[in-house]
Image (cartoon, grey):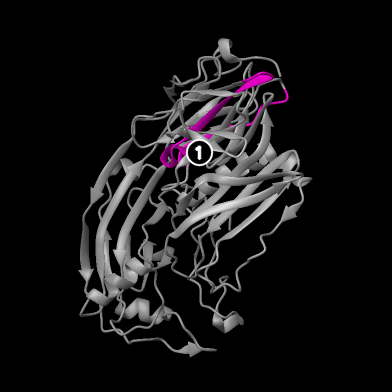
Amino acid sequence: MYAGGTNPARGLQESQATGYPNDIVALSYDFHAPIGEAGLLAGSYAELRRQHAFLAAFGPMLADLPSSLPDVRPSGVADRSTLRWALRASPQGGFLFLAWRQPHEPLDTYEAARFRVQLGEEELLLPSRPVDVPPGTLASWPIGLTVGGVRIGWVTASALTLLGGPVPTLVLVAQPGVPVELAVPPEAGAVGAGRTGRSGSWETYGITPGRSAVRVRAPRGAVDVLVLSAEDGSHAWVREGSEAGGERELLLSPDALTWGESAVLGVSVTGEPDVQRYDVDTREFRPVELRPLTAAPLAAEVLPVQRRPAGTVPSDYGFHDGRQSAPTDSAVETRAAVYELELPPWALDGSGDVSIHIEWAGDVAELRVDGVAVSDRFWDGSCWSIDAKDVGVQQGRAVTLHVLPLAPDSKIRLPAAADERRRQSCNALLAVDRVRMERRQRWSSDTGGPSWRSSASHRPS
């Protein structure tokens, strides 16, 4: 799922009764999608956004590159000792892809990793010193690329995009725990990086991730190498150039950005917006001027008032082909605890951009408006977000939260943090930890002109 949604009626979900292996909640079709059911962005959205930016910039080149696998490869999905990596490259360069992340298999740090790759007649051994690879690492390191007339031996940071300008900018993102090393020819120099030595025919430099680029000069050209920190990488947005002559642009924002062909920027936030744009002329990030389009953001804590205690719950609700069945509708109706949510008046005007965030623990929960279920969720320890307008929250309508407890001896598989909370509970697990309302504010950089970019940095392609 790329964007989550909500079933338009009950009885449309996958279920064991209709031949599926699992029971799914009746209404929510979120599945932790990058764009959630409530229209909010999940952490995985930033991961895909970086991947899409990489493919937009380097995909045409990558498509023609042959793939090479190492001689020693994993024996299977349960192999927790063999590093997973591959090379997509020609003699003119390419990328080393590294994956030290295995679902359902806890990995330890891979110690002393080093790679020997062949580019035509040239052999590269990188990095210059072995590095430890933390679990969870996913990387795409440039190998032997020529940018701006400068051949780069390697950079141990993931390629994000390539910006134009008098001096092109290669933008990368550092992996947590992996030192960033840049290798360039001996006749080149890297201004802003500390020289660390030599590896074969390459001079090596250490780069501290940040918002300042390292300029590499060589007899045939120059290139700026900008290595963002992992945190800034998760806030990076790349706007592709338009057919009207606009060039690719790099922005940083923790909030959601939107734009169209007119290059007008929009942002949705719950506080003061912070959008930075990288200026290829000045080689620095500059704030983007924004004006509000909607009412000021608001937030409020909601105190759930319990109207009915929970009943006793069984350890399970039956099995189908070895998989546990979900609680029945009657179990939720008769055994769930019921809480009334007294929402603030500003959340009830139906104006939109208002969300309900529920942190809870239990088995299954439903949000009801005037007694009708409008959203539901199985508990997995994550926050449950709901768009108030989508579910019909309005003035004069009763909003209640129904939470069915989770039996202490239930064998349902949960994520590690949620499973730990279940094991620490001596009784049936039932909690509503926090209910919070938020109204987002939309901003724009449109000032009536043709573009939000400064004229100094707007060059024809």
Q: Position of residue 196 (x, y in %)?
A: 46, 34
Residue found at the far top of this picture? 456
Residue 14 versus residue 189 in the image, above or below:
below
Closer-to-camera residue (419/306)? 419
> Where on the picture, by quarter, is residue 459?
top right
> Where on the picture, by quarter, is residue 429?
bottom left
The residue lying at 39 percent from left, 28 percent from top is 274
Closer-to-camera residue (200/429)? 200
Q: Is residue 339 left or right of residue 226?
A: left
Q: Is residue 162 left or right of residue 322?
A: right
Closer-to-camera residue (318/255)? 255
Residue 411 versus residue 70 in the image, above or below:
below
Q: Quadrant of the N terminus?
A: bottom right
Residue found at the far right of this picture? 64
Closer-to-camera residue (331/217)? 217
Q: Position of residue 451 (x, y in %)?
A: 59, 17
Q: Label 1 amino acid? A: Glu
Q: Position of residue 33 (x, y in %)?
A: 52, 56
Residue 76 lies in the magenta-colored region = no
> Where on the picture, by quarter, is residue 220?
top right
Residue 281 versus residue 392 in the image, above or below:
above
Question: Is any part of residue 81 visible from this angle?
Answer: yes
- Residue beneath disc 1: 181
Q: Quadrant of the C terminus?
A: top right
